[in-house]
Amino acid sequence: AARVEVVGDGRVSSLALAHSELLVGGGSGLLLGKTRLDVTTGLPFLRVSAVASWRGTPVVAFEREGWARVGAAGAEEAVTGWGLLHVRALLETPAGELLVGAREGLFRVAFGSDELERLDREPVRALVLGSAGAIACGGETGLRMISGSGAPATVVSTPDAWIDDLGFDGSGRLWVATPIGVAVAGVGSGSTPFVHPRGGDVTRGVVINDGFVGVPIGAEAHVATLRADGTRREEITPERFRHLFLLGDSLWADGPSGLWRRDERTGWMLVQKRDEASLPLPRVTALLEDRGTLWAGFFDGGLARSPLAKWDASLRWAPLDGSDAWGINALLPAGGAILAATLHGAYRIEGARAVALEGAGGAFSLAATRSGVVVGYGQGVYFPEKRLLSAFHGLPGNQALALSYASARDALWVGTPSGLGRIERRRVDFRAVTGDGKLPHPWITALVDRGDSLLVATYGGGVTRRSGEGRSEAWAPFVETSALKVNAGAMLVDPSGRIWIGTQGQGLWRSDVAQARFERLSLPLPSPDVFSLALVPRDAPEALLIGTDEGLARLPLQQLSEMTEN
């Protein structure tokens, strides 16, 4: 097996205690006391959505899908007759049963039993136990009270149907966190929650004692405590927290620096520092190494960079100021600068300075040509002389998801969701679309011009190779990849000639050196959804970087070249 380094975003999603050891689940896997578990040590996926202690045994749910019990042999994944579950909440009852709240409903299982009982069909995001064994469940479709005895659920009206957090206070009042603020119900099962008069800016939090504590919307570093009498108290915090947790009688918080705990006498204390290598965000959609700096672009954020003097050096990510809302699709080195194609347009980055380029809306791809950099937009292909070519000029479609420059003939290949086109002398001189019998799928996601051939990756038809011109034109699909969805931009060729592709749901694939066939690599990736690939260092590769929707993996090329097919 290859030595794999895996990096997540380090965020905390859930806390629990098992045999007096702290369980911490989140964007970098599971921390059990001082032992970290991730995909390199047996977890099926990196991101953890919930943790719980079930009679002292750690139980963990994964953000992508499924849940597992963690024992001496590692993670034992649950298999049920209800099919695949997307679990968001776990809760142990006083009777030692485990409540499992999932997108598919509410379930219950007794300790040592192999039977999972379904109590309700509505989606669950939050769980709390009430009086007389009642279970309060909140999710995307509202708040429901479940008796646990098989009686029909009671629907409780709330200001908004989307429920993220629930809790009963010491007086029996039910607190509900919704996107429009916190609501509180009076004492008694028949009470209807009403929006707290000063809780409209609090959408997540926990119930502690007789109040609700949450992080208000905004940039200020503080938490707010809401009381049932309508009052509110503010407390300054060391940094702006992202999420609050209640563990026993203690209040905990996740922040940019790590995991915090509030002590009644000394205030907030940092008890677990965030790993310096942690990513700012998990979904890595673009990667690039340039002159000793590693750049990463994120789907739901902007750019971050880390120094990389050696290919295996430790990572220390620093976000690029002002890029938070970009949504990165592609990166390209250009004349000492970095170009970024983003949903907010194309940018040129030099040092810490970013300058927006002229263009036509959201940008998806980039290519360096003899006359300058070409940008693929949602409205067509934009050339350095400020000319836009689109479907109106003969391209199969407007959205230029993939570009590849054919330097031998000074031509540009353009991949769109509707087919393949080629631009030469600023004219569309070639098209391949549905019905031609050439493409395995019309949705083109990545292109690599090899001089004597063109590699074409598709979303749903795998990879094919085009060679020749005119009557000698030939298409040779790689049959092993015929059902694969190759993600946008997730294809490259290493110096040995191997082709690498990142897929949706099927992990990482590579060809042999002769480019005759593909194989899937059995690797402990953060997720099987691979969105970006990069060779490091770019000019003399030693490692392959793999960006997924749950984090980043770094693998030595030498070890990968020795691996056999899965």
Image: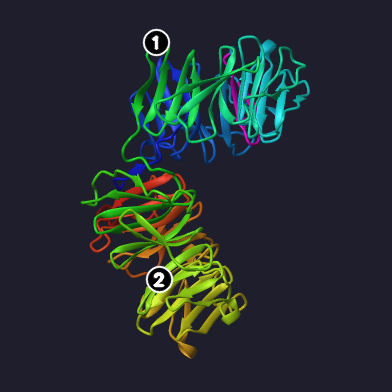
Instruction: Classify 40 as above or below 325.
Output: above
Which picture quadrant has residue 203? top right
Q: Which residue is mark 2?
A: 367
Residue type of the residue flagged with mark 2: Ala
Choose between 473 and 329: the one closer to the eye: 329
Query: Pointer 1 and pointer 2: residues touching (CB < 8 Å)?
Result: no
Q: CA distance from mark 1 to mark 2?
A: 59 Å
Residue 138 is labelled as none
Judged from the image, the secondary structure of the residue bearing numbered disc 2 is strand
Image colouring: rainbow
Expressed as whole percent of the image width and height from the top left, the position of residue 273 reads 33, 29
Q: Dot 2: within a 10 Å radius of its alpha carbon, few (fewer than 14), some, or many (20 or more) residues?
A: many
Expressed as whole percent of the image width and height from the top left, the position of residue 48 reads 47, 34
Which picture quadrant has residue 454? bottom left
Q: Does residue 147 show up magenta in the picture?
A: no
Q: Does residue 105 show up magenta in the picture?
A: yes
Expressed as whole percent of the image width and height from the top left, the position of residue 562 reads 28, 55
Choose between 491 and 201: the one closer to the eye: 201
Residue type of the residue flagged with mark 1: Arg
Of circles 1 and 2, which is in front?
1
Residue 265 is labelled as 1
Which picture quadrant has residue 232? top right
Q: Which residues are magenta?
A: 96-109
Expressed as whole percent of the image width and height from the top left, the position of residue 236 reads 45, 23
Residue extending farthest to the bottom is: 471
**Residue in the picture at 49% in, 63% down:** 364
Is residue 553 left or right of 65 when viewed as pictured? Answer: left
Instruction: Classify 227 as above or below 366.
Output: above
Q: Dot 1: within a 10 Å radius of its alpha carbon, few (fewer than 14), some, or many (20 or more) residues?
A: few
Judged from the image, the secondary structure of the residue bearing numbered disc 1 is loop
The number of numbered discs placed on residues in the rendered structure image is 2
The mark nearer the N terminus, 1 or 2, is 1
